[in-house]
Image: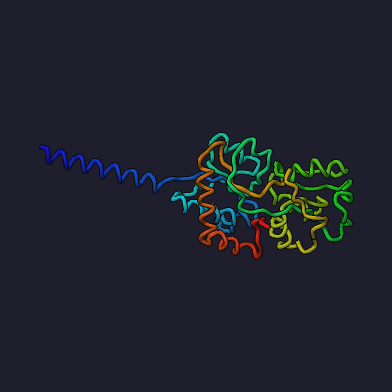
Amino acid sequence: MKLKSGFSALALMSAVALFSHVQASERTLRIGVEAAYPPFAYKTPDNQLVGFDYDIGEALCAKLQAKCKWIEIEFDGLIPSLKVRKIDAAISSVSITEERLKSVDFTSSYYRLPARVVTRKDSGIGNVPGDLAGKRIGVQRATNFDRYATERFASSGAQIVKYGSQNEVFLDLLSGRLDAALAGSVAIEEGLFKVAGGSDYHFVGEPFTEEKYFGTGAGIAVRKKDPLASELNQALQAIHDDGTYDAIRKKYFQYDISGNP
């Protein structure tokens, strides 16, 4: 009887260990993303999610021995979705700003790029914001670009037109329903300059980097006091150290996007 009990205990311990291993290997992180912001996150013609943010997220999940479950959400719904626990993190080019830090925590920045104004080459707009008076300026709603344009350009007489996605901004700019747009420099290069008709457009004015509006770079947003932020920071450091980050970066950019001097 004692021998049988010993085997039973051993079997139970093995089963518990196996169950624990399966649980660990099946850890899932629900990642919120707006899949309409090339080259950071977008859909291929066969409906596959791809992009810099996506690749970074997958690399981080691999380091954490977790599975990324990607949940598509419009940009202005990312932080609300975090707060109601619909997602565990947002990897979607979310800038780290003082305003957002009141609602969520962030990892360290994983890239930083300036904002730019773009307009048709024959628009006559050269001085920003002076030449924007009376012009229609497109921005994506609830972004740092929205806040900056509303607070800085509207006071110069510009009409700020807000959209649900960056693609909508570019479509209206190309169709002539907008005079200019304010967005991230790379988003403009990829989402406007490289499409049909995009060669008719160019940057005007200087890059915008003011931290009050544009923060200290893009970070991964998590809920307040969530230890996941620390785990993700360790994973970020790991993919920098082993070269994974730079390999991903080179797929999309031929220059440094870290924002480091």
Which quarter of the picture shows residue 148?
top right
Q: Please state the horizontal and vertical placement of residue 258, each as a whole percent of the image.
A: 64, 56
Image quadrant holding the N terminus, namely top left
Evaluate whether residue 257 shows in this view: yes
- 110 w.r.t. 20: above or below: below
From the viewer's side, name the closer residue of 234 and 248: 234
Question: Could you tell me residue 248's position as x and y percent?
Answer: 57, 61
Q: Residue at x 80, y 40 (%)?
A: 151
Image point (52%, 47%), residue name? 232
Compared across the picture, whether 41 is left or right of 177 comes to: left
Choose top left, top right, bottom left or bottom right for residue 47: bottom right
Which residue is located at x 54 percent, y 46 percent? 31
- Can residue 33 be seen in this snapshot? no
Is 91 displayed left or right of 97 in the figure? left
The quadrant the C terminus occupies is: bottom right
Residue at 65 percent of width and 61 percent of height:
256
Residue 215 image point, x, y percent: 69, 46
